[in-house]
Amino acid sequence: MPRDAEPRQSNTHVAREIAKLIVTGVWQEGWTLPREIELASQFEVSRTSIRESLSILKAKGLIAARQKAGTHVRERINWNMLDAELLEWTWAGRPSEEFARQLTQVRRIVEPEACAICAERGSDTDLARIERAYREMDAAGMDSRAYSEPDLRFHRGILTATGNDFLVAFGATVEAALRMSFELSTLNPGAPRKSLPYHRAILDEIWARNPDGARRAMHRLMDLTERNITSALSRRRNGEAMAAAAEREGDA
Amino acid sequence: MPRDAEPRQSNTHVAREIAKLIVTGVWQEGWTLPREIELASQFEVSRTSIRESLSILKAKGLIAARQKAGTHVRERINWNMLDAELLEWTWAGRPSEEFARQLTQVRRIVEPEACAICAERGSDTDLARIERAYREMDAAGMDSRAYSEPDLRFHRGILTATGNDFLVAFGATVEAALRMSFELSTLNPGAPRKSLPYHRAILDEIWARNPDGARRAMHRLMDLTERNITSALSRRRNGEAMAAAAEREGDA
DNA sequence: TTTTGATAATATGACCGACATAAAATGCCA
DNA sequence: TGGCATTTTATGTCGGTCATATTATCAAAA
């Protein structure tokens, strides 16, 4: 179910637009934003709506306001990059290679350990839910759209099974990573399906209640994912370079 | 510098109050909140202010609103527990043992790996900043208030040195954990200072550019921290049990 | 000339009342 | 009873006004 790129609700729409200006660096850290009244006329909404939008961005740590002094962009260190929406806004459209690298790096740190905890302490109900997600991935066949949704449920299921609210919250980050992978998979349609046996291995290890094995199995999946992403990115890079060359050829 | 427990700004104040009702389970998952007008009269602020407060909570994933249907508490899975303010609201006053356990568990997962990455790829500038924090911890002596602030900078410095924005964002979680430790340390004033040599060991390993050693050193610090927290919590439990017994004694 | 203190200017914070919109609830009709 | 038009209602948006906290200004004093 694709979320709308342009939500009709004006405050979320405006928040998204302003957030994009900030994360893309058009409005840099420390800079002061235009006055609320000016923002209101720029975005053609009321000052009330602007204020609600800004309060969303304040909540995510992107900006801070002081009376008379204005509203300024906070330094990156205060941005809550692990927030679902902020993640989406950041890579919206085109994930940078650096963003992909960092995302892969944190997943490597968190998911194998979560998987070990899941194998050790997940309830049978938890594991059954994970297995159901696996079956749906299997049933999806080569349809990578139908595959990606249970894929996310599989990973979320593992995080949930840990019983740790902070690891559960990390699901937002995993979701962003999977959506990015899915997006990039258009450059390599067969890739997602190749992860199925790796998921199978994880499932077997957690049913066997084998934490070390589960950790290793998840680690192997992370390796595969990283290979897929780097190859998709380099393919994209080459494709764009060739397109640019063709462009120059056409000009000459 | 202690943040104000009761911010004078009305919308953050109201947001905090409502958030507490939700995280403490007074308003449970799935429940529908009172109408905005009713909330306005309950909290004695205008509907505009209520709406700004609610938009903060929406941004953190705690609630969602639909026209006509009302505003409801979202399921925990959507709460962004890794958010700085939400963390603070959750343990405000009295950290539950479960909360402490989960917090310690994620730190164990993330910080040792971050430390290894820091040793491998942190710039000399990054490491110098970490060392400066260490020196200030040393200089603080037995004053656990003066100790805790550079302690946080030490850990944040390691996360920053990884160059990974998501690990940097994890600093909010570490901050919550350290504040909690600091709070609990009133039950055991000498405890914080005991962590100094462990920090020293970490510093030495990252200067030696030894990722494995750095990982192990951070792991040992996590062990110490966990021991301190569990002992403080059990002390608190015993203290309260004895107080309750004395209470019963007094009644009889 | 520099400092200090009163004063004015201004951007965010809060409030109000009205209308728009979407979706749930109602009730009518077949 | 079932489907469809209508009403109801809670959130969404708007414009305007006043409050409040700082910054900026400027004049008097050291």
Image (cartoon, coloured by chain):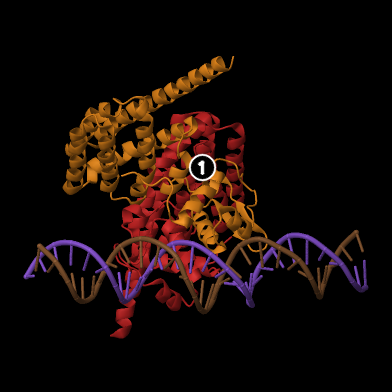
Chain colours: A red, B orange, C purple, D brown
Amino acid carrying label 1: it is His
Counting from the top left corner in percent of width and height, residue A55 is at 45, 61
The quadrant of the image that shows the C terminus of chain A is bottom left
Chain at numbered mark 1: A
Q: Is residue A250 left or right of residue A118?
A: left
In the figure, B23 relative to B243: above or below? below
List the residue tagged with mark 1: A199
Place residue D22 in its image quadrant.
bottom left
In the figure, B52 relative to B111: above or below? below
Image label count: 1
Res A216 seen here: no
Counting from the top left corner in percent of width and height, residue B246 is at 51, 17
Counting from the top left corner in percent of width and height, residue A48 is at 50, 69
Res B15 seen here: yes
Q: Residue at position x 52%, y 48% from top?
A: B17
Place residue A144 in its image quadrant.
bottom right
> A6 and A203: which one is in front?
A6
Q: Residue at position x 51%, y 34% from top?
A: A118
Q: Is residue D18 left or right of residue A26?
A: right
> B130 and B48: which one is in front?
B48
Place residue D1 in its image quadrant.
bottom right
**Dot 1 alpha-carbon crowd within 10 angstroms: few under 14, some 14 to 19, many 20 or more:** many
Q: Residue at position x 40%, y 53% from top?
A: A80
In the figure, D10 relative to B13: above or below? below
Counting from the top left corner in percent of width and height, residue B185 is at 35, 29
